[in-house]
Amino acid sequence: MRRTLLAPLALAVVLLGTQPASAANAPGWEFTSAPARPTAPGWEPAPSAPWDVGAGMRCDFPVHGEPVVDEVEQRVLSTHPDGSVRRVAYRGDLVVRVTNTATGASHDADVSGTALVEYRRDGSQFWAVRGPVLVGVGEGRGSLPRGLYVVDGVFTMDIGADGFKNVRLLHATTDDLCARID
């Protein structure tokens, strides 16, 4: 059960570049369950939760994200000696409606990529991705400028224990969602 709860939480934290309420004492991180659906052996649902980021954190305005299609699954490939998750594969359809809450402008972002994620003991992570995937970057917190992006193609993302995201575009493009909903 611990693996089931940890992986979706970590996925949300990584993609949005924020911390869960338990870590940051901030409201708004409530995880909901997706409807039960059949999965292949070894795969289990990894539902996403709605999220909010304040003005200036990713875009110049406040943003709300909410899954409108969520069929993401995870498969734990290996664990650390203490049983905590080490490597996880993610796959499945995910469309997130990203909304500028100041104006109501929105965009449905297809972020149905696949990822192999290594969760390191020091809290850092390494992602090998075939996008599209949603990536949020704070000011001075990554190799991409502050923003909210759909990164599509083949890329890696090394996330330091301090949260700095080094995105290496091997054969990929970025779509600035802040510009789409400004």
Image (tube, rainbow, N blue to C red):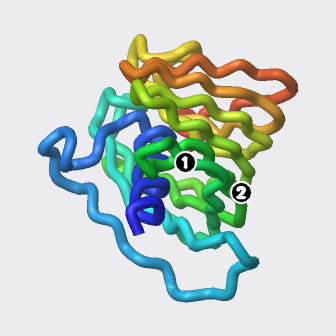
Q: Is residue 111 left or right of residue 49?
A: right
Secondary element at image label 2: loop
Left or right for 10, reference 37 = left
In the image: residue 147, left or right of residue 61: right
- Between 6 and 66, the one lying in front of the other is 6
Quarter of the image for residue 65 reads bottom left
Res 122 visible: yes
Identify which residue, 128 or 16, lies in the foreground.
Answer: 128
Q: Is residue 110 visible?
A: no
Q: What is the residue that sits farthest to the left in this orientation?
A: 25
Image location (x, y in percent) of residue 130: 79, 42
Helix, strand or loop for disc 1: strand
Q: Is residue 171 above or below residue 23?
A: above
Ranked by sequence position, the earlier of labels 1 and 2 is 1
Q: CA distance from mark 1 to mark 2?
A: 25 Å
Q: Residues within 10 Å of mark 2 (few under 14, many from 20)?
A: many
Q: Residue at x 44, y 47 (%)?
A: 10
Tell me, for residue 163, which label it has, or none.
none
Pointer 2 residue: 112
When asked about the image quadrant of residue 43, the answer is bottom right
Please name the residue that numbered disc 1 is placed on.
79
Question: Residue at horizontal 54%, vertical 66%?
Answer: 46
- At x 73%, y 77%, the residue is 41
Residue 111 screen position, x and y as percent: 67, 52
Residue 170 or residue 68, whichever sits in front: 170
